[in-house]
């Protein structure tokens, strides 16, 4: 990764939608470290104010409390902005199955509002969070960007529609876009609480409380778990690439390796036991498979390497070690 490439950000203004969320807040911090001017748009439906506590008073940081479903809020947020990192969305396959209407309103109507606002404001580049769920029922491994299947959930439909809209806004209006298909991102600031918590932080807090995590299925389902710093690298590369061929494309944002849920829980127990030896004795339970889940996920990152110069820095073990350390230091549980 050529950090010299990122120097142009020091004279740029970047909007991060969903900037109080897990990925968004990490991006805000990194951009400020690179001396960029940063605007955060968030309605705090899932984002958290504490995620912004370290940067809230930074003179180059502006927080706009607003909803991407409101076009006026989007227009206010993009005013004078050079680049957009669009992270705002309602995640979670189960949430979209339980409430498809709200997922559609946020993820499709809100996305369209941001595209319109960015087009009208003359934004140079619109980089957005796409999703590995777009691969749907395709059984081919590894996942390659131009071969997708049929979506398996309302959430997957919304993220695929985002890609279609981004493509149309380039061909019709000339707005340059890049979509990043995130694969099971994890790391610092990821929320372990709530009904739709991601598996890694949820399991971490359960282990820390000496509670048995429940694996959906027999534990053989596998994922390309991707540490947050790899995702940050991809966003920075997408923002700053000078390769015209790299624009108006979608990219897998992953490691190119997979870990099943049995292996994941073993690694979590191993790393957490270094802080609390009792965790090694916590048993894991099994429940039914979850509706809308795909059995296996593994990305090819060849396209990102070739066109963006991506080199993932963190495999699952190194990323989990850092994540566990962060959770141990920052989560208040009865240890």
Image (spheres, rainbow, N blue to C red):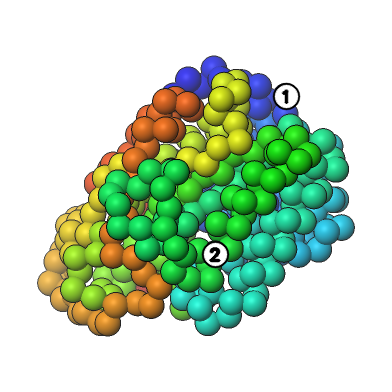
Q: What quarter of the picture does the N terminus occupy?
A: top left
70 or 151: which is nearer to us? 151
Q: Residue beneath label 1, please?
A: 11
Residue 272 horizontal/vertical position (percent): 24, 59
Q: Quadrant of residue 247?
A: top right
Pick out the residue farthest to the left: 281
Q: Nearer the viewer, mark 2 or mark 1?
A: 2
Residue 196 horizontal/vertical position (percent): 46, 73
| Marks 2 and 1 close (CB-CB < 8 Å) | no
Q: Is residue 226 left or right of residue 237?
A: left
Residue 109 horizontal/vertical position (percent): 72, 63
278 or 221: which is nearer to us? 221
Q: Quadrant of residue 71?
A: bottom right
Residue at point 24%, 64% (across, down) = 221
Q: Is residue 112 left or right of residue 89?
A: right
Pick out the residue farthest to the top: 4
| Camera sees residue 56 | no
Residue 331 horizontal/vertical position (percent): 41, 64
| Camera sees residue 167 | yes
**Considering the numbered disc 2 on the image, is that residue within a helix, a strand or a loop?**
helix
Q: Is residue 198 left or right of residue 280?
A: right
Residue at point 82%, 36% (across, down) = 122
Residue at point 48%, 48% (across, down) = 181
Q: How many marks?
A: 2
60 or 24: which is nearer to us? 24
Q: What quarter of the picture does the C terminus occupy?
A: bottom left
Gap between marks 2 and 1 measured at Cα: 37 Å
292 shown above or below 80: below
Q: Residue beneath label 2, please?
A: 157
125 shown above or below 198: above
């Amino acid at each position: 990764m050529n950090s010299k490439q990122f120097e142009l950000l020091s004279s740029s203004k970047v909007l991060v939608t969903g900037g109080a969320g897990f990925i968004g807040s990490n991006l805000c911090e990194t951009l400020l470290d690179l001396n960029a001017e940063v605007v955060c748009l968030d309605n705090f439906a899932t984002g958290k104010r504490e995620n912004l506590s370290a940067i809230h008073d930074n003179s180059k940081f502006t927080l706009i409390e607003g909803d991407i479903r409101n076009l006026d809020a989007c227009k206010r947020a993009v005013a004078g902005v050079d680049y957009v990192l669009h992270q705002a969305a309602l995640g979670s396959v189960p949430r979209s199955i339980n409430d498809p209407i709200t997922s559609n309103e946020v993820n499709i109507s809100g996305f369209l509002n941001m595209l319109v606002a960015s087009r009208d404001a003359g934004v140079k580049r619109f980089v957005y969070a796409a999703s590995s769920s777009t691969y749907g029922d395709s059984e081919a491994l590894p996942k390659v960007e131009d071969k997708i299947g049929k979506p398996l959930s309302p959430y997957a439909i919304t993220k695929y529609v985002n890609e279609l809209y981004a493509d149309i806004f380039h061909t019709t209006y000339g707005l340059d876009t890049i979509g990043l298909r995130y694969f099971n991102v994890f790391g610092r600031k990821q929320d372990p609480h709530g009904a739709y918590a991601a598996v890694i932080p949820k399991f971490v807090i359960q282990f820390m409380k000496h509670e048995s995590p429940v694996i959906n299925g027999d534990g053989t389902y596998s994922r390309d778990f991707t540490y947050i710093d790899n995702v940050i690298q991809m966003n920075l590369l997408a923002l700053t690439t000078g390769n015209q061929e790299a624009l108006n494309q979608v990219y897998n944002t992953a490691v190119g390796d997979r870990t099943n849920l049995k292996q994941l829980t073993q690694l979590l127990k191993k790393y957490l036991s270094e802080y609390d030896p009792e965790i090694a004795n916590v048993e894991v339970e099994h429940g039914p498979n979850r509706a809308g889940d795909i059995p296996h996920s593994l990305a090819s990152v060849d396209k990102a390497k070739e066109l963006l110069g991506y080199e993932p820095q963190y495999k699952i073990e190194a990323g989990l070690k850092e994540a566990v350390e962060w959770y141990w230091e920052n989560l208040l549980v009865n240890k």
